[in-house]
Amino acid sequence: MGELVVDKHVKYILSVEKRKDSFESVVLEHLRMNGAYWGLTTLDLLGKLDALDSNEVIQWIMKCQHESGLLDLYSIMGGVAFCYAGGFAGNIGHDPHLLYTLSAVQVLALFDKLNVLDADKVANCILICFSSVTFEIVCPLFEILLFGSLKIKISSIPIQLIIGHPFLGLLNFMPDISGLQNEDGSFSGDEWGEVDSRFPYLAICCLSILHRLDKMNVEKAVNYIASCKNVDGGFGCTPGGESHAGQIFCCVGALAITGSLHHVDKDLLGWWLCERQVKSGGLNGRPEKLPDVCYSWWVLSSLIMIDRVHWINKDKLVKFILNCQDTENGGISDRPEDAVDVFHTYFGVAGSLMAFYYLLFHCKHFLKATRATNSTLNS
Amino acid sequence: MDAEEHKLPLSQNPEWADVTPIPQDDGPNPVVPIAYKPEFIETMDYFRAVYKANEFSPRALQLTHQAILLNPGNYTVWHFRRLILDALGIDLNEELEFMSGISENNPKNYQIWHHRRWIAEKLGTDVASKELDFTKRMLFLDAKNYHAWSYRQWVLQALGGWENELSYCHQLLEEDVFNNSAWNQRYFVVTGSPLLGGLEAMRESEVKYTVEAILRSPENESPWRYLRGLYKNDPKSWISDPQVSSVCLKVLSAKANHVFALSTLLDLLSHGFQANQEFKDAVDSLRPSSSDPPDSDLAKAICSILRHVDPMRVNYWTWRENKLPLSV
C-alpha cells in the first residue's frame, strides 16, 4: 500500500490559488467560500496552515460578510437559504447564504479568529434566515402594509422588533407542518414542506461554534430531523426521502451537537452505513451506487458519532483513498484514475486521517473549536 | 431584441447604453482567484447593475437567462429572475418550458429544482401530471437522481397525481430491481398514498411482491430492507408471518448469495422466532468445510457463517454474536 503524499497535496492546494482559466473556477465562483474551507482545512490537517497568510484570508472572509441584507420572502426554500445582515456570501459581491456562513465561521475557527466576529449578529442572521418563511405565511398583510414591496431591508428593522413581534413570535425555527396543510390535505404555499435536513445541521453547527445554540428552538429542529428517519435507520432530505450518506451525516451531526442521539437507532444505522463499503474498500452513499472518496468522510464521521466505526474495514478504505491520489501532482479524485479537485482532496485527506487517527483528529479539532469559542466568549 | 442585437456584446448594444456595469470585486489579494472569461465578466457586470437598480424589465429577464446559461448555480440570478417574473406577470407556463430546456444539462443543480418548484407551486394542481412527466423524463436519464425524486415526492404531496405511482415504481423495478430509490418511492407510496389505504391494507400484496423480487436477486439489499419496513411497528407479525421465514429458507437452500437471508434469520431469532429443524439443516449445510464442529446454537452458527462469507464486516458480525441472548 502507498502512503498519503502529504507534500504533493499541500503543493496542489496552494497551486489551486494560482490556477487560471479553468471551467471549474467559473462554476465555483459563487461558492468560493466553500473552496476556501476545503483547501484551508486540508492544509490544517496536513499541518501546513501557515503556508498561507492568515490575515489576508481573514480580510477576504470579512469582505464577504453582509452588513445589511435584503429579505426576500419568496426565495427561501429547497436549495436556497439566504442569510441576511451578518451572513456571509460565497464570494465578495454575492448574496449571503447559510452554506457560506458556516464555511466562513469554520475557517475563522480554524485560524482561531472567531473573535473578529460579532457572534450575536451572525446568530441573528441565521435565525432570521430560518424564520422568514413563517413570516410570509403568518402575515403577508403585515409585509405589504409595512414595507409595501417584496424586499425588506432587514438591517433597518431592529432585531427585537422582529423577534418580539406578536405575529413573529412564531419565529421559532420550524413551524408545525400540519398547520400549513389545507383542509383537503394539500399543502398551501408553504416552503417548509421541502426544508432540507441539511439546513438544520448547518444552522445548528454554526450556532454551536458561536455558542449561540440557546437562541434557537432546538426541539423543533430535532423533531424535524427525526421525522426524516427511515425504516432502514438512515435519514433522507425530507420525511420519506431516500436514505443518503450525506444527509445522514447532516442529521446525525445535528443530533450529536444537540445531545439528541437517542433519536438514532445506532445499531440499525451502523449496519446500513457499514454496508456502504464495497469490494474495492471504498464507500458509496446509497445502495448500488459507485464508491466515492467524499463518502469516506460522510460515512466514517457518521459511524464515529454513533460509536460504530470499528464495523467497517479501515485498512481497505484507506487503500481505496490512497489509490485515488495523483501521486505526481497531488490532489485526490472521487475514484481511481479520475481528475482531482479540492473537494475530494479535502474529504480524502480527512477520511484517510480519520480512519486511523480519528481519536487524535477528533481531540485536536474539538480542542481548537473550544479554545476558539472560549476566546470569543471571553472577548 | 432581434437576433442581430442579441449577438452584440452588451457594452456595444444601444439597448444597454443607459446602464453602467458594476465590476466584480474579488478583494485585493484573492485567496482562490478565478480567471473569468470575458463574456462571463461582461454579463455579470451588467447583471450586478440591474440587480442593484431593482430593474424589473424584459431586458433584465433576458439578461438573467444569459447569466443562468453561463452559471446555472448562481442563486442570486435565479432569485432576481423570480422577482422579475412576478413583477412583469409573465405566464409561468412559458417559464416551465424554459426550465425544461436547461434542466437536462443540469440535473443536479439545486437552483433549477428550486425554481421549478416555485413555478409549480404558483400554477397549482393543473400542472401535477406535467410535473410528474417531467421528473419521469429526468429519471429516465438517471433513475437515482436524488433531486428528481425529492421533487417528485413534493409534487405528489402538494399537487397530487398518486393514481399511477405504484405502477411507475413497478416499471422502474422491472427495469432495475436494484434501484434503491424506486424501492424507497414504493414505500413512500404504500405508506403515504391517500388512495391505497395505508401500510396494513397493502401489506399482504406487498410482501408477495417483495418475496418474488428477493428470490430473483437474493443479494439485493433493498427488498430485504423493504420487507422489514412492511412490518414497521409490528414485530410480532414480522416474526410470525411464515412468508418472511420461508423466503429466508428458500434462499438458504439455494446456497448462493445468502448474506441477507442469514442476517434476516438472525434478526428473527433475536426477536424470538423459533426455528425448526429445516432451518437448522439449511444453515448447517452452509458451514465452511474447514470450520469447527456445528454450533448447537443456531444464531451463533449464523454469525460464524456471516463472518466467513462477509469478511469486510467481520467486526459487525462478531458484535452481533456477542450481543446474542444466552438462551437463543
Image: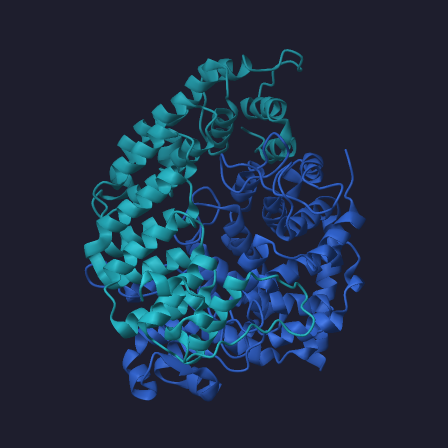
Chain colours: A blue, B cyan
Seen at 41% across and 71% down, the residue is B13
Could you tell me residue B164's position as x and y percent? 23, 40
Residue A131, image quadrant: bottom left
Q: Is residue B298 in view from this perspective?
A: yes
Seen at 52% across and 25% down, the residue is B259
Residue B19, image quadrant: bottom left
Which image quarter is the N terminus of chain B in?
bottom left
Residue A195, image quadrant: bottom left
Task: Say whether residue B127 is left or right of residue A205.
Answer: left
Seen at 30% across and 33% down, the residue is B170
Could you tell me residue A190's position as x and y percent? 32, 66
Height in image: B285 above or below A217?
A: above
Q: How many marks?
A: 0
Could you tell me residue A284's position as x and y percent? 55, 39
Which residue is nearer to you in this view: B318 or B209?
B209
Task: Say whether residue A50 is left or right of residue B314.
Answer: right
Q: Is residue A193 in view from this perspective?
A: no
Task: Say whether residue A280 is left or right of residue B141.
Answer: right
Height in image: B67 above or below B224?
A: below
Could you tell me residue A237's position as x and y percent? 44, 53
Task: Say whether residue B223 is left or right of residue B285.
Answer: left
Height in image: B327 above or below A108?
A: above
